[in-house]
Image: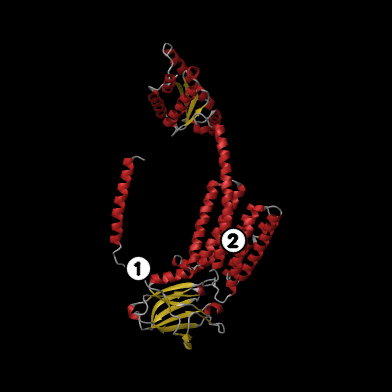
Amino acid sequence: MSRIHKGMVLVLSVLTVGVLVPTWIDVSKMELDSIWDGEATSLKEGWTLSVDGEVLDDDFTLPHIIKDRDLTDKRVTLSRTIIPSSKIALRSLLFRTSQKRVKVFVDDRLIYSYDGNIDNRRISIIGLINHFVRLEEEDEGKVLSIEMIGNLPKSSGQFHDVYFGNRTAQIRQLFGYDGISFIIGIFLIIISLITALIASRSLRNGRLYHSTLALGAIELCVGLWACGGSMSTQLFIRNQLFLVVLAMTALYMLPVCVTWFVISMYSIPKPRCFMIAVLFFPIAFVVVSALQLLGMITYITVATPVGILLFIYMLTLIGAVMYAYRRGEKNAKPFLIATGFLLASIVGELTLLILPHRTFINIQPFNIGVLIFGSILYSQILALGVNYLEERGRKEYLQSLAYTDALTGLGNRRAFDEELIRLAKSGSDQKDLGVVMFDVNNLKQINDDFGHAEGDLVLKQIGELLSSLYGAFAKLYRIGGDEFALVCEQCSQKKMAEIKRSFSEATTGKPFTLAFGSALSSMDSPDSIDVLFKIADRRMYQHKKMMKYDSHHKSSPIPSSIDMVEGTR
């Protein structure tokens, strides 16, 4: 780097810092309230619980579960006085329920209504719904009543926290509750799509290709499951039942994807038996969905037994991989380690299903376990992918050597012959095909007088010249010691004339000369590609004879590089 250049960089850096720093200091003096100011406060005490107008508890505390009484289809009301806004930012109300109907009153004025429309639907599940209710300034000090009608005995007795605060604080509270599930889910879905793209674009090896796609499918299933189970997802998709169906679809397809990965990655015993056995899960999903439409069962009814069956199947599959590992399948070790974390997370999920505060599809242990599971398997796939790409690169390099002229970098005679064969098979695509043959004049004399190194330099310069002129739209080849060829598809008479003109202009004044001959299928009407090539070749030799006749009394052309070599001798 020159001194002037260094000085300019230094001055520019000083000016940049001298301008940006004062700018940042100046704009930082603005005073704005953060959109995240304030907290969403849970009002746990001071509630009154009424059932069908009868007060059951005038000092009810949230959250709470009533186990000894069936509140299904009963009008359950939680009420309390709205506290002054001087104590809490009173702008919005947030609570979640799993009831089929919810209404919110301020005094006797209805301000919010929700209806799960359960009586007009075949699927009798509600899901856990977030309710955002707007409050006005004049509502402070009035009586707030939340009226609910339950759908199932278990969910009708569950009462969750009620949060007061501004809307942004409540959104932050919601993300704080299970936002990690939403973030992990979106991350896994993006990773799965990237994985599928990489597999389809970069991998052609059958085993590695299918293994990578299977791993991407695993991450997609888990990502959909995590998003479906996150309450935060409802900020973007309000219909909780849609999320439930999405999550259950992912759950039933997960063992299929894991089995696909194992069979494509490792040599396990009885792979066909596993592929048949794992079909139970998608078939069961279809059957359960059909029975749910008939009103006989729901996804929740079979959630625990399906989880147990999934656990048993995974144990069996892991046993098969462990057997293969003991028989010499050393690549299976990362999978065994990864599934150890996955099984631990499934145990955590089953535990959540047993606990009274279970959330059905909101599973932190499972999310974390799958993250570890995927990370370990991705590291293995990445290592195999790098090895595969390196090997493919070596093969492509060796193949390119077989079709590339080492001196000029153009295609060689083998590549030219195969191109003619391809064009001959293309049939109707030969309508506007152009072929130009080039031959270097007096190359043998240059080699004899100045050495083969100078002759090679001339050939290399010619290759570079042809590439710069025609490489963008034509294929170029060195087909002999001093012969070059150009093949141009979709070559009109105008383009062929331009090729000849640009060639003549580019070679004028050069320390070498070339004879050339061209043929155009639209003008010469050859019977075949070979005939077109022979026409161009014959015209090139005719041109070469004319050039030799014209230069019979002139000295041979000497490249500029040869003049330099001659001067040093």
Image: 332 above or below 486: below
Q: Which mark is residue 34?
A: 1
Whether residue 289 is visible to the viewer of this picture, yes or no, is yes
Quarter residue 294 falls in: bottom right
Indicate the position of residue 358 as horizontal and vertical percent values: 55, 73
Q: Residue at x 45, y 27 (%)?
A: 461
Quarter that holds the C terminus: top left
Q: Label 2, on which residue? A: 254
Quarter residue 262 falls in: bottom right
Q: Residue at x 51, y 56 (%)?
A: 191
Asked which secondary structure carries label 2, the reply is helix
Crowding near the residue tagged with mark 2, few <14, some 14–19, many ≥20 C-alpha atoms within 10 Å: many
Q: Measure the C-alpha gap from mark 2 to mark 1.
A: 42 Å
Whether residue 302 is visible to the viewer of this picture, yes or no, is no
Q: Which is more foreground, mark 2 or mark 1?
A: 1
Relative depth, front residue between 237 and 467: 467
Q: Is residue 315 left or right of residue 238?
A: right
